[in-house]
Image (cartoon, helix red, strand yellow):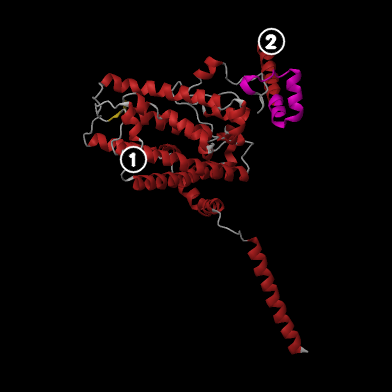
Amino acid sequence: MTETSHRNKINGTSQSKEGIDESNEETKPKYWDPLTDGVKWIEKYAEPLEKFFERLPEFISTFIATFAVFTFGSTLRGEWVVILVTALKQIFGHTQSDRNMTTEEIYKLFTSENLKMENFAVIFISAHFVSYGTYFAIGGFLHWYFYVRRRHLAQEWKIQPKKWLSPELERHEIMIGTLSLFITGSFSAFLACYIYNENPSTVYYQFNEYGWLWFFLQFPILFIYTDYTTYILHRLYHTPWLYKNFHKLHHKYKQPTAFSVTAIHPVEIMHVQLTMCLPLFTLPVHWMPFYAVALYNYYHGIIDHSGINFKGQWWQPWQPDAQFHDEHHQFFHCNYGFNMSLWDKFHGTMRKINRVYTEETFHGEAPLIDSVEAKKIIETDSDAKEFVEKTKGIEAVNTSKDILNSKQ
């Protein structure tokens, strides 16, 4: 009996171990998920990073975070490789070719025989290596610095402190952003290789080739061109058909993060990037003003999508606060501008606090807050209802203050 019971115990133990092993196998993911592993990695090293930042003065940790945002923006879409190529051409004394090409020559250029693309593989791999490296490393750092390290202090820094993207949407924006990065990074690699091999363009390299006056005028001209065309394209993609088929993808993120900046439909992001590059083939453009404006745009693109309550600095009175674009994600069809609110003011597309916006209120036709149409929207839209209650609460407080001030 003793021997039999002993065997049964052994068999029972082995069976239970097999059961545990089987359950472990069931809980293990069937495939490697880099996004989940990335989050686990951040959580694993969060504590030592936390201790390191606690020892730093506040201004140094803020500088590190700001520098990380700039580096994130400057390398994200692969433009760094174009900047490197054009800067090297200036250093080695290259000048723009004065020879005008005929239409036939331009047509023939884009053939395998005439288009010079030496070293494309090296440039292509380098562009993507750096872009994806900064996307995950610095993007992960920024996410940790604010969304993990300072999550409990959200009231101090977050524009929407009580609302957060779901884990599913966070994964989604990274997946879409990764795809869009591959497309824009590939285009940047092509452009860098195109310029490197001295194919025709209107880019010049020496400061004085077109005079110093034109060199300095390029900064405001390119800035206005970039910002206004971006406004026009953005508003175009908020027309019903283009919005529903392309831009709606980007508006899944009503509480955007730094990863949202590239989470755009590949067709749309390439449309924007091609439009931004038109001056390189139509005007005499020095590489430095062009990419200074581009990097400024990318830097503020990350700031505006970060969900962090960044304010415009004293030296940039044209720059709206990050809340301006964050409200665009909250209220959809308003606040189309990026680095200037001027275009929205001029075209009447600024968000109006007495209107109720939804994803279906195209062309700025949002109903008044007390209208019958608005009341119907409130009945079915919880976000609209919350906004109206908050707005009326603010109005009631302001009215009470006015009454008290008048009595005094």
| Residue at image coords 40%, 33% | 295
| Residue 106 is inside the magenta segment | no
Q: Secondary structure at mark 2?
A: helix
Q: Establish if 326 lies above or below 178.
A: above
User: What secondary structure do most residues of the magenta stretch adopt?
Assistant: helix
Q: Quadrant of residue 157?
A: top right
Which mark identifies residue 193?
A: 1
Q: Nearer the viewer, residue 174 or 182?
A: 182
Q: Disc 2 vs disc 1: which is toward the camera?
A: 1
Q: Residue furthest left?
A: 93
| Residue 374 is inside the magenta segment | yes
User: Which amino acid is tagged 1?
Assistant: Cys
Q: Mark 2: few, some, or many residues within 10 Å (few <14, many ≥20)? A: few
Bounds of the magenta segment? 362-389
Q: Which residue is mark 2?
A: 407
Residue 135 on image: x %, y %: 46, 44
- Location of the C terminus by quadrant is top right
Q: Mark 1: few, some, or many residues within 10 Å (few <14, many ≥20)? A: many
Could you give the CA–CA distance between mark 2 and mark 1, rounded to whole angstroms? 72 Å
User: Which amino acid is tagged 2?
Assistant: Lys
| Residue at image coords 58%, 43% | 172
| Residue at image coords 31%, 24% | 284
